[in-house]
Amino acid sequence: MTSTAHHPAPHSAEPMELLRGMLEEEFAAQTARLTQLTVYARLPRHGGHDPHTLEMLAASARRRIAETAHALRRMSEGSYGVCADCRRPIPLGRLRALPCATRCGVCERSR
């Protein structure tokens, strides 16, 4: 008896549109957050915030914007939801929890 590799079918359009909406909302929220942090950094006394903390928060917002933009780009290219390592579909549950995920759970744990 021979075994064949089982590759799950690509995700249907409905969950992908929900994920796209989640990613677009995250992009907008992080962009607004970065704008707010930039304004605080330029205010006298930094709007009551520690300059180092502001820079760390801004760096985090920039990173999340980049991850979200990358995920949206993968969606438009048709490679979103496919593991960057094993090339199998990333389970929808993982994508719902981590919409910017580029790897399935197995490959992520093995890194």
Image: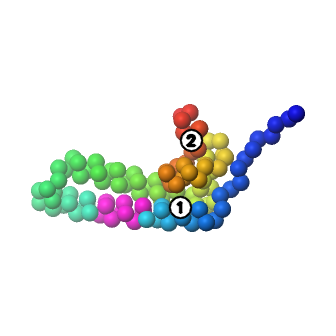
How packed is label 2: few (under 14 Cα within 10 Å), some, or many (20 or more)?
Answer: few
Q: Position of residue 109 (x, y in %)?
A: 54, 35
Residue type, mark 2 in image: Gly
Q: Quadrant of the N terminus?
A: top right
Residue depicted at 33% across the width and 65% down the height: 32
Residue type, mark 1 in image: Leu
| The label number, if any, that marks residue 19 in the structure image | 1
Q: Position of residue 91 (x, y in %)?
A: 61, 49
Q: Position of residue 80 (x, y in %)?
A: 59, 56
Give the mark nearest the N terminus, 1 or 2. Answer: 1
What span is colored magenta in the figure?
Answer: 26-35
| Horizontal arrangement in the rendering, residue 24 relative to residue 61 (left or right) | right
Residue depicted at 85% across the width and 35% down the height: 2
Residue depicted at 50% across the width and 66% down the height: 21
| Horizontal arrangement in the rendering, residue 101 relative to residue 89 (left or right) | left
Q: Which residue is mark 2?
A: 105
